[in-house]
Image: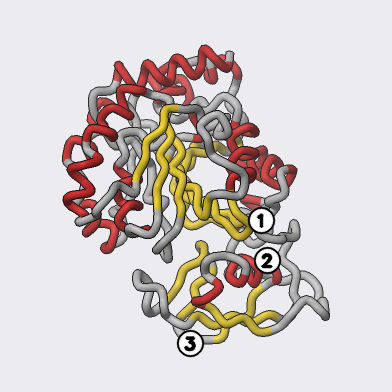
């Protein structure tokens, strides 16, 4: 089924869909407007690229100056060109996609964008390849600061290979930041073979608990949720086929740092110094960790490592160490059931 699935996806995004107006569901559409600073950067992206955008979120974190970023399933390059502006001329962006029709659009506008950004030479490269085999695409071990993906991993028939490759190429302290579709139950086999359901980012959605188990097995037991919304199946035919399944569009982040499978309390306190340009007054790590500038915030050991052993290190002061353990840390917001829903560490 693997090769056939890849061929079906290539055909759907290369030949069936002419623009995002041809989509039958909202699964591959953002639920909300991007942050204001992303809106401004989006104005510098060619309109023909924007019309062929099929993402379900805005998986573009802050503090990216000088970073090397990998965009999985980059399509026509909308997010890659936004990231190009954020990493600057000292950084670089590599976009990987298997669909030649999408890549041809991305490549033909490289010069136009570099002129628009005022760059002397391109800091963006687009490679034809498969996200299940980044080595074949020339991505070396421990070479990437940030991996992003926008509603693409659900389309892969081998998700364990995708996440294994992501962890391989990330540097120590690197981050995976992605938006994708997940389900509240496992997708029945007959629906997984449905070309339209698969192409619309539904039939390949991972059951959220299977995703948690997979990431734990791969050494990342604490994945954080930033956004989550329930998808509505508005198309009557798709509703009849798959209306019994709850689908969610989610934006998640994970760090390649030492992590425990639950939040543990070692007495750490974090202070955000307000130095990230995009977030001068507060920094949002996930859906229940907000750091106001200068305010002390008690954090678990996992959160302390995410902030102190990643690119955010210079933007935070972390007090405490791992000498004394005080038991489990209640990392969920008051009245929240998020821990029960996801089963991963602090989310």
Q: Quadrant of residue 3?
A: top right
Q: Which residue is mark 1?
A: 222
Alpha carbons under labels 1 and 2: distance apart: 8 Å
Is any atom of residue 244 visible in this view?
A: no
Crowd rating for badge 3 (residues with CA inside 10 Å; few <14, some 14–19, many 20+): some
Q: Which residue is mark 2?
A: 302
* Numbered circle sitting on residue 74: none
Circle 2 sits in a helix, a strand or a loop, which is it? Answer: helix
Q: Quadrant of the C terminus?
A: bottom right
Front position in the image: 36 or 161: 161
- Residue 154 rendering spot, x and y as whole percentages: 51, 32
Circle 1 sits in a helix, a strand or a loop, which is it? Answer: loop
Residue furthest front as drawn: 120
Kindly check if marks 1 and 2 are in contact, taking CB atoms under 8 A apart as contact. yes
Q: Name which residue lies at 64% across and 62% down.
A: 346
Alpha carbons under labels 2 and 3: distance apart: 21 Å
Q: Which residue is mark 3?
A: 294
Q: Name which residue lies at 43% across and 35% down.
A: 96
Circle 3 sits in a helix, a strand or a loop, which is it? Answer: loop
Mark 1 or mark 2: whose residue is earlier in sequence? 1
């Amino acid at each position: 089924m693997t090769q056939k699935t890849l061929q079906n996806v290539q055909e759907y995004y290369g030949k069936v869909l002419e623009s995002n107006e041809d989509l039958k569901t909202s699964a591959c559409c953002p639920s909300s407007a991007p942050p204001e600073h992303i809106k401004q950067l989006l104005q510098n992206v060619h309109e023909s690229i924007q019309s062929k955008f099929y993402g379900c979120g805005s998986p573009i974190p802050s503090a990216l100056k000088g970073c090397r970023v990998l965009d999985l399933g980059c399509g026509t390059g909308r997010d890659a060109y936004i990231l190009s502006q954020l990493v600057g001329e000292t950084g670089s962006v590599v976009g990987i996609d298997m669909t030649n029709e999408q890549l041809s659009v991305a490549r033909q506008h490289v010069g136009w964008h570099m002129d628009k950004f005022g760059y002397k030479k391109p800091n963006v490269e687009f490679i034809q390849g498969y996200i299940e085999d980044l080595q074949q695409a020339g991505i070396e071990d421990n070479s990437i600061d940030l991996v992003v993906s926008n509603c693409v991993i659900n389309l892969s028939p081998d998700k364990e290979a995708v996440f294994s490759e992501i962890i391989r190429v990330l540097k120590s302290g690197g981050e995976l930041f992605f938006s994708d579709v997940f389900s509240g139950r496992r997708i029945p086999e007959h629906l997984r073979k449905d070309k339209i359901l698969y192409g619309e980012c539904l039939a390949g959605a991972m059951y959220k608990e299977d995703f948690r188990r997979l990431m734990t097995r791969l050494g990342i037991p604490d994945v954080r949720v930033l956004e989550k919304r329930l998808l509505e199946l508005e198309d009557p035919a798709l509703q009849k086929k798959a209306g019994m399944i709850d689908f969610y569009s989610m934006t998640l982040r994970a760090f390649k740092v030492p992590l425990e499978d639950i939040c543990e309390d070692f007495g750490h306190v974090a202070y955000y110094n307000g130095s990230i340009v995009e977030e001068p007054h507060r920094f949002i790590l996930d859906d229940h960790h907000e750091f106001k500038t200068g305010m002390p915030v008690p954090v678990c050991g996992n959160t302390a490592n995410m902030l102190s052993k990643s690119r955010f290190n210079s933007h935070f002061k972390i007090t405490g160490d791992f000498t004394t353990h005080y038991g489990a840390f209640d990392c969920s917001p008051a009245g929240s059931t998020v821990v029960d829903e996801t089963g991963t560490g602090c989310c």
